[in-house]
Amino acid sequence: MSNYHIKHLEEYFQVYRKSVNQPEAFWEEIAEENFMWRKKWNAVLDWDFSKPSVQWFRGAKLNITENCIDRHLLTRGDQTAILFEPNNPNEPAEPISYKQLSVRVNKFANVLKSKGIQKGDRVCIYLPMIPELSVALLACARIGAIHSVVFAGFSATALATRINDSDCKMIITSDGAFRGNKTIDLKGIVDEALDRCTCVESVLVVKRIESEIQMKSGRDFWIAPLLEKASDTCQIEIMDAEDPLFILYTSGSTGMPKGMVHSTAGYMVYSAYTFKNTFQYTENDVYWCTADIGWITGHSYIVYGPLANGATTLMFEGVPSYPDFGRFWEIVQKHKVNQFYTAPTAIRALAKHGTELVNTYDLSSLKVLGSVGEPINEEAWHWYNDNIGKRNSPIVDTWWQTETGGIMITPIPYVTPTKPTYATLPFIGIQACLMDENGQELKGNQVEGRLCIKFPWPSIARTIWGNHQRYKETYFSAYEHKYFTGDGALRDEVGYYRITGRVDDVIIVSGHNLGTAPIEDAINEHPAVVESAIVGFPHYVKGSALYGYVILKDTGESRKHDNLRKEINQIITEHIGPIAKLDKIQFTDGLPKTRSGKIMRRILRKIAANEMENIGDISTLLNPEVVQSIIDNKL
Ligand code: 7RM
């Protein structure tokens, strides 16, 4: 199994070369030696980026839960699979062994079946970070149902849109969620969403906060009594390699969120293999990823990747600031965490509170630190390296996307020398390249362009649910025969990559991808608003924050601007969620437009970032005079 675990830089280059020169032989060996198959494949890879169509391990049969649970029962049944750390630090942590996980997943799967869920049905999961969330994903996978997790911070409108887009037959939720010293009424949000969904036949409710909630008879069911009655054995559904495992929505620059569809076998192989190497996970380590399972990071690197490796994966219900800003470090100390994976926005938020609290905890168990979600700025990188890793734990700055399913560019810790703000080298099997504006590949080093991938990897999303055409246009049309990431990047003198950020209209706020269009759509619903444009601007903690330019109707109304600002953010909260609230709202008489009527966001971005001096050429605008007036009234 030498290929499975890279230990030296020489070995990385050697294995990388093999993965590029003989990709099929390479992935076949990884798949063959490290997973359980009910039937082997007829072909390792079929692909055509012009369709686009990608199939890995065609003809193979398997179930991912057999790989994540059953096969570990003999060798590590009593080892902790999921280590649950509750929101309240005084509530005891709950270690769930592989054996216990097996019982819980099997029972849960039987409950799903008893409610009529079958292979191929879509099940929406809207839960806080409690064990039932991981169990629900695995229970779906066990019976071949396609899960669609919606982050429990999304509003009723956002939830309804996602439920309807993929025609979910069931939703799994809880009475509510704990979040720091607050509780959130999840069931109330679900009820509101379901007023707009006719596809949902049943609602399973986990009791978490013991609040009074409405239960609609015949539709809503408490899950506890059903689990109690259910058998603890549920035969796996034998799945085709290419059967969809899950749908996960991600915002695009325009229109509806995109339901990215991930397959079974390729996703399993790639999430497991990247987990093993990116975190150098070794037997008995305790691994912690702080992401929410509502995002791809949680799917791949809290649930599937770690469990496929028989790892111990910590699941944290709470927030970094509760009961104080030392919570993360308290957890690292308490559970002797070895690998810690978080987002730059969290690092900056914690760094703001200094090192006094950090230094009261013993962080000596840490071996690897990870970063994901957005470019990590130099200051945050050093703070993380100095104060958390004590310059002893390499930082893996992992670049990847919902669409890629797994980590694509990253250092391998103790193997690849790190460099602040650089994601460094493509992972094994990843053929990254940079393209210029004319569609030519930029060869050699010290170049900057748009980041593309030239060859399929096992966990590439196979389509957008219900809209293959959009999948093709978004990812495979900008450059012929290449997957376009939407990110810009540069390659330094030794070939290391640095991601410079999105080149489209997606803004990443605290690690959450937000499309400008849905936010603008929400604002424009306000009766006093004519038009709006949202841009990102640099924010110390969030990475980017949102700046809104809003044109008001001339109603002669004397309503206070501050009230309007509140109302606008209220509408955004209702439509998308509090994460999309605007930090700044500037009322303006006009927006800079091209002659074809497109808002010139480039100019608005410069103004929001206070970079008026290099605003560039505005002579081609339809209304150049508006620019000065926006600058004069800048907040
Ligand atoms: C895993 C995840 C994807 C977008 C991606 C980038 C940005 C993610 C990094 C990063 C710089 C990184 N999936 N991004 N990781 N930028 N350095 N290490 O975040 O679908 O939610 O977002 O996030 O712009 O395209 S995602």
Image: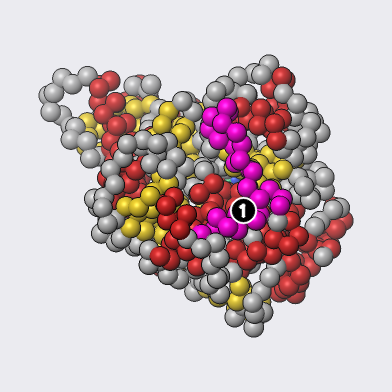
State whether residue 88 is above or below residue 486.
Answer: above
Q: Which residues are magenta?
A: 78-107
**Looking at numbered disc 1 in the image, what kind of residue is underneath it?**
Gln
The residue located at (25%, 59%) in the rendering is: 198
Q: Confirm whether the magenta stretch covers residue 82.
A: yes
Count numbered badges in the picture.
1
Viewer-nearest residue: 227 or 563: 227
Asked if residue 136 is positioned above or below residue 31 in the image, the reply reads above
Task: Please tell me which residue is depicted at 53% across the width and 37% down the height of the picture.
Answer: 317
Locate the C terminus and report the quarter of the image it occupies: top left
Q: Nearer the viewer, residue 413 or 502?
A: 413
Please name the residue shown 73% across and 72% down the image.
32
Is residue 325 rendered to the left or right of residue 132? right
Outermost residue, front side: 229
Image quadrant containing the N terminus: bottom right
Residue ID for mark 1: 100
Figure quadrant of residue 483:
bottom right
